[in-house]
Structures are given as C-alpha cells and as structure tokens.
Image (tube, grey):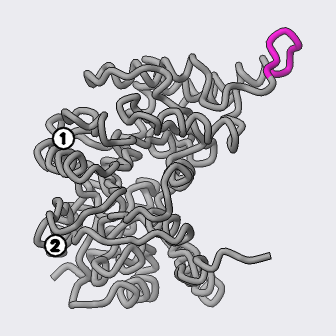
Amino acid sequence: MKINENYYNLEQSYLFSTVARKVNEFSKNNPDKKIIRLGIGDVTLPLCKAVVDALHSAADEMGNKETFRGYGPEQGYDFLQNAVKKYYENRNVELDTDEIFISDGAKSDLGNILDLFSKDNTVLVPDPVYPVYVDTNVMAGRNVVYANANESNGFLPLPDSNQKPDIIYICSPNNPTGAVYNKEQLKKWVDYALNVKAVILFDAAYECFISDDTLPKSIYEISGAKKCAIEFCSLSKTAGFTGTRCGYTVVPHELGELNKFWLRRQTTKFNGVPYIVQRAAQAVFSDEGQKEIKENINYYKENAKLISLTLDECNIWHVGGKNSPYIWLKCPNNMKSWEFFDYLLENIQVVGTPGSGFGKNGEGFFRLTSFGSRENTKEAMERFKKLFKV
C-alpha cells in the first residue's frame, strides 16, 4: 500500500478549523463574554415556506407505495433540470437539459470535476482564493500558479499573457473578497481561455447577491463562454440549503467530450441528490419560491450594507458588500491578518476570517460575512465603532 504523498503538501489545518479552535479556546476561558461570529459563511435564516412545503409533500410521497421513489437519475430529475433551464432562460441564456447536472453542492463538484483532467495540467487560481480550489489540485499533484489579485486592481485580476494555464478558476462574486467582474473583464478571460485552449471553472455560487443589473450572473452571458467554461452554482446561499445540500453544474455540449465524461463520472461515482431535496429545490425556482428567497437575500444584503457603512465611518478600506455577502477589509494600523483576528476576539469578541488563510495576497486583509442575524450584525458594528471610530 502506498499513500498519496501529495497530502503532505497541504496546509496542516483547514482555515476554518483553525478559526473554530481559536474561538472555542477563547470561549472556554471567557464564558461570560458574548462572541459574535461573522466568519464562516453559513446562513442563519430558515428555509422559506415554499421549500418547506415541498419537502413535506415529497416526504409524504415517499411514505406511499404508489408514489415512493428509489434510485433516481444521477444527473438529476428532469423536473429540476427544467426548472434550472428556465432560470437561465430568464437571463437570456439557452441551455439543454442534458447540459445541467444536479449535485449536492458547488464545493463537491468543484473538487470532483478534476476527475476529468490529467494531473499534468497547470491550474491558475486567483490569490487570494477559496482554499478548496488550491487544496483539491494539490491533492492530485497538479502544478498551481496564481493570478495576482490585490488592492490596486480591486482584487479582480485580468489575464497575464505570460501565463499559459490549462485550467482557470474564476469566482464572481468572489469568495473571499466580494469583488465582481463586469462583462468586459469576463470577456477578456473568455478570449484568453479560448486563445490558450484552457477551460474555465466558473464558480457562480453567490450570483443571487448581484444587485447591479449590468454585472453578469453567469459566464454564459459572455459570447464564446460555452466553448471554454463549466459553471457551478449552489442553492446554499441562494435559498439557505447549506444543511439541505443541492446545487447544479453546467457542462455545455460545445466543450465536446467533457459533457459525456462528466455524465460518465457522475453515473459511476455519484448516486444523485435525494428526491425530497430535489423537490425542495424545484420549489426555489417557482414564482412563490423566488419571491420568498429574495426576501431572505435582501435581509443579508442589508446586513452587508450595514457592515460597509460602519467601515466607512471607521475609515477602514474595503471592497465587496454591495453585490456580495462578503466584505473584504484592510486591517487597520498595518496589522497582520491573524493579529487582527486575535485583536477583535480579545477586545470586542467579533469573529471574522483572516485574509492570509486565502493566500499570500490576503495577508493584511480580513473577511466579514453578512450571514449573521440583524441583531448580531448591528451589535458587532456598534462594537467596531467603539474600537475604531475616530
């Protein structure tokens, strides 16, 4: 037996595990202090009524012999594929149902899609970046290079003609920075990928938070994208499915064998999303479901606005928030990311995520999320003002 020695090349601890350990230690030593968590991007509002009703109805079906369902299609039931297809049509993006694959979330598919590619491929990811992009490729032994995202370019790097990657990761709205590419910027990435014959893995998990109608929510709004891009999306943040688990991945026919390969991979290694969850997901795309989830999304957007306005009052530089649930701030007084994490925890018991955990360009920056309750978000920002407002 030989182990995969690439695991030795991973960071010893996953970023959010380290955050949790530090918070737990502080809480144990300071049981009288209220900690407000604005770090991990988990939702706090419950599933909307349309979704819960669909879950109950589907559960009832599973309890009757006439409507019971066993194994379903690994790529998803056609009723949910058609619902996603219609969702894209509303944005003037035409897809075939067999280009849409239902999954248990974007995170899973972003890792599993790598089964389709040789380990000899060079992977380009932005820095800072969601750790899963890097870690899954390190596990496979691929060469990883970086696109330089920084304060001067608004954390929206553009292609570098000196780099010749085979796989390109783009996340817009970005996690962790909250920055969003416009159509002209994404067009440069699409043209670049076509020129170097690379495939773009486009993470659209936060598309529902884009308020500016001029900004693209799907890479397929860009001409030529179907020839070079696979898109991943999730209902985790869109509809609060972090604990329910459902998402979808689009692999266009224009990518040639990749569509067939992904179908083959999924039918071999994946048994599909539970029927009751897919019925719940279908309800998300209903008229009533869309109305209800937008109320929840707007709740989080208001939290983001509150955080952004507070940082403005405290004269703290930041991006994100307007079109994203994430706010990416520059640590005051030239503090390092983990130094700032400890400073907040010790002084005002507010927890965020150190930017350095997302890459070397994240050093000196910090991520806050808008997924907390309104009450906790307000209290956290009042604490910020007492600590930083001049």
Q: Is residue 375 visible?
A: yes
**Disc 1 or 2, which lies upstream in sequence?**
2
> Vertically, is 215 above or below 152?
above
Spot the residue most to the right.
Answer: 65
**Residue name at image x 23 percent, y 53 percent:** 196
The residue singled out by tag 1 in the image is 215
Q: Kindly state the secondary structure of the residue where label 1 is placed.
A: loop
Per the model, the C-alpha gap separating discs 1 and 2 is: 20 Å
Q: Is residue 357 left or right of residue 362?
A: right
Q: Residues within 10 Å of mark 2 (few under 14, many from 20)?
A: some
Residue 84 found in image quarter: top left
The amino acid marked with disc number 2 is Glu
List x then y, in percent, for residue 125: 33, 64
**383 part of magenta stretch:** no
The amino acid marked with disc number 1 is Leu
List x then y, in percent, for residue 167: 36, 56
Q: Is residue 36 left or right of residue 187?
A: right
Q: Which stretch is magenta?
A: 62-69
Q: Is residue 24 left or right of residue 385?
A: right
List x then y, in percent, for residue 260: 52, 33
**Residue name at image x 71 percent, y 19 percent:** 57
Relative to the observer, which residue lies in front, 112 or 253? 253
Overall secondary structure of the magenta section: loop
